[in-house]
Image (tube, helix red, strand yellow):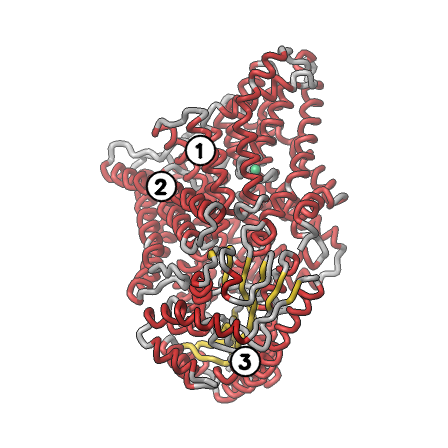
Amino acid sequence: QSETLRLSHQWSNKDVRHQVAQIVADEVAAADVDLEIQIFGSKSLFKPREQYRPLSRGQLDMSVLPLSYAGGQQPAYNLTLMPGMVKNHDHAARLSASPFMEALEEKMADDDVMVLVHGYLAGGFVGKDKCITAPEDVKGLQTRAAGKAFEQMLAGAGASIASMASSEIYNAMQTGVLTAANTSSSSFVSYRIYEQVKCYTPAGDVALWFMYQPLLMNKSRFDGLNADQQKALLDASAKAEAYYLEEAKKQDAESEKVFRDAGVEIAQMSSEDFDAWRALAQETSYKAFVADVPDGQQLLDMALAVE
Amino acid sequence: MDPLTLGGIVALATILVLFSGVSVALGLLIVSTGFLMVFDGMRSLELLPEILFGKLDNFALLSIPMFIIMGSSIASTRAGADLYEALERWLTRVPGGLVISNLGACALFAAMSGSSPATCAAIGKMGIPEMRKRGYPDGVAAGSIAAGGTLGILIPPSVTMIVYGIATETSIGRLFLAGVIPGLMLVALFMAWSLYATWRSGDQKLLNSAGYTWKEKFEILPRVLPFLLIIVGVLYAMYGGVATPSETAAVGALLCLIIAMVIYKLWNPRDLWVVLRDSTKESVMILFIIAAAGVFSYMLSSLYITQSIANWIGTLDVNPWVLMGAVNVFLLIAGFFLPPVAVILMAAPILLPIITTAGFDPIWFAVVLTINMEIGLISPPVGLNLYVINGIAPDISLKTILSGSLPFVGCMILAIVLLCLFPGLATWLPDAVMGAAL
Amino acid sequence: MAGSSSAVASQTGNNPFLRFVAALSTVAGWCSAAMIVAAVAITCQMIFVRFVLNGSTVWQTEAVIYLAIGATLIGLPYVQRLRGHVNVDLIPLMLGKRARFVMAICTLTLSIAMVAIMLWYGYEFWHLTFERNWKSDTVWGVRLWIPYLAMPLGFGLFLLQLIADLVAVILKIDAPFGLEDT
Ligand code: NA
Ligand code: NA
């Protein structure tokens, strides 16, 4: 019979993550299998961090969600926002198809959640007064980091961590409450951070900040669909995943262009810088993760094993 | 069912439930729960606590109790009287002296308090008896304070601007600045009307109140200093890189408490408790309405009503100003019955897309919306400021307070018209201080 | 004339149950006020650490948010006792004495049912969080059952105060809607 699925996410309808959801919705509609996907964007249904629990309990059908938001419920998910774990977008795609991701999907299955579209987005650093490439650059800066593991690593590098909502970054940068920040390329652009900073270090050949942001679905809900509907959904997802990967690569270049056009200096992270950050992360965030999660070491090794 | 029809039914049910006398917050929860139960199934109720908790899970909301503490700690001291007396001594040569000082005191006090009833109470306690003693008509005395008190939510800091900023994700610092010039404009309009009303009452000596010597004028100045200290301190914290706007509220609350205790000797635990009790009462009431209105807007969104209304308005081919007129009428009516924060939270998700699609500036709209809410504060049946005046001067009949306030409602409508003609009144200052709008 | 709170709290007469509930609500009010004060203090401490000492402030924002939520939920019964929850009593004012009494019983019963629902699901929500030991996804990693405890606690006390108010109206110790006959 005819089914309607409700999909929630936190982004505007110009965002790539909305477009991924839209492709799936459009493709499924075109398949004509009595399946409709209703998209609730811009946090209009649930707040970002409120989505995982309704999703796992079947009150929400689908969500495009940074998986680490649910790290308080499934600590293993914190591995999906670990500094230096992913080097670039192709590496991210290989990671999505690895035994590491299978292990994570098993954990999701325990919560009755499955992945439809895999995808990683990258991000970088901005400095109000100077460029940030190596760990010593952040010493003494008031920094707002996206993600727990990044806060741990940056604190290890001597930065002062300020926690605030992402919507406050612009003001805080303007008045000087913040002197550095780290988040995704698209957030930097959508919050117009380029108006307030001197230097931007985008994701380039190497980047520290990668966040896994898949399109998830409630598993029981998927299993309850008929075979045609399931096939339409999976086909649509495969198409969306290819698009997601291509767009993710473009995002970094586009954000770089926006910052450059705004007169912001662009810095590049060298592979030596990357190695220094990763060594620091091993001492700080990786260590804390392994101490915190029972099978943490095993999962970490699986992730690091991906070439 | 068609979401638009469903929306009509929800509106009707909401009106019925709220008019039954149940508290606004619980009423909103009751309506939301009822519709969720029927249209989303019993299991959707499992989400209620998480949604309620989530709506309060926002740092900026915390500035609400803090801006309320600022107002009520100062209001519990002699500070209001000092401020008021200083203005009177200095403005004595200005025609209409006393009522002008009252309005000036309201405006200054509004710059220290985020809430309108607090502003109204602080100045009214002193101002209304004094004006009546000197022979001002009851209507002018009560009406000017009721109206002057509403400035509490237009002149920064402002609880409603914070809530609007959260609901629409606009910069709270920018919203605060947008309220400054329209706030001053309203003060001027209020003063002009009060002067006219006093003059019309025929008692010419009211227009020239007693003179003061220069000694008396300078004597009182040190007592106004604490106010300047607080205002400068808060502005420095907010725009000087010390803290974000929402954090600044804590600085303000602390400064006010310290000044109340050190300068005004408010250290008797019993007196301090009165300050805390009043702030807790108002804050909890507002925050609970915010949480409940959040659940209500979840229900509207979950039943696809919000989206359908926005789509429907989008298909209407109307002149943006006709649309703006309709939005204003809607806000006015909602403001008659509901407290400002409830209106903002329930209406913002529906109105904002409409407003921005029609090409209006959300910062400018915040000011228009706030003035609409100010009107609601001095109009029946739910007029928080009327209630405050009633508490201060129980012997002035409600009819007199109302008829005294009505002309000020006229001033506010005039202010909205002026804002529509000259949007720069709201947008110029934030742009000048913080750079062009986002 | 309608509006919020009269300055008068609800009447308890000499009824021991009403006085007990009133006392509980008052204690809840103290806790709520204390949490707000603590939130002010912590925010100022955070600004000091960041602005003056240029240090890290990882836990303050979260702590302050939970304190504010706690203050709101725990403060509900006290504000109810002070009649601080705004309502529109236009219709009750127009009604006669008898009809107003019936109306008050209806709205109070409806309120009690609503708060009971919140208490029930709030308890479940808290219990699940406690059982699975969920934490917030920050460096501080608070065990979430602690802040979520405010939900069953606040709504539980709120329920008691509403029941007390209903009892007071039925026993004619308090006037319906707190409106004295005019
Ligand atoms: Na104000
Ligand atoms: Na009103």
Q: Chain of mark 1?
A: B
In the image shown, does B203 or A140 lie closer to the viewer?
Answer: A140
Q: Quadrant of residue B47?
A: bottom left
Q: Residue at x 58, y 65 (%)?
A: A187
Residue B14 placement (x, y as % from top left): 51, 52
Q: Amino acid at mark 3?
A: Leu
Figure quadrant of the C terminus of chain B: bottom right
Q: Quadrant of residue A33?
A: bottom right
Residue C149 placement (x, y as % from top left): 32, 55
Identify the residue position indicated by label 3 in the image: A35
Q: Is residue B384 above or below residue A19?
A: above
Identify the residue position indicated by label 1 in the image: B257
Identify the residue position indicated by label 2 in the image: C34
Q: Residues within 10 Å of mark 1 (few under 14, many from 20)?
A: many
| Residue B45 as seen in the image, left or right of residue B118 | left
Separation of residues labelled 3 and 1 (CA atoms): 60 Å
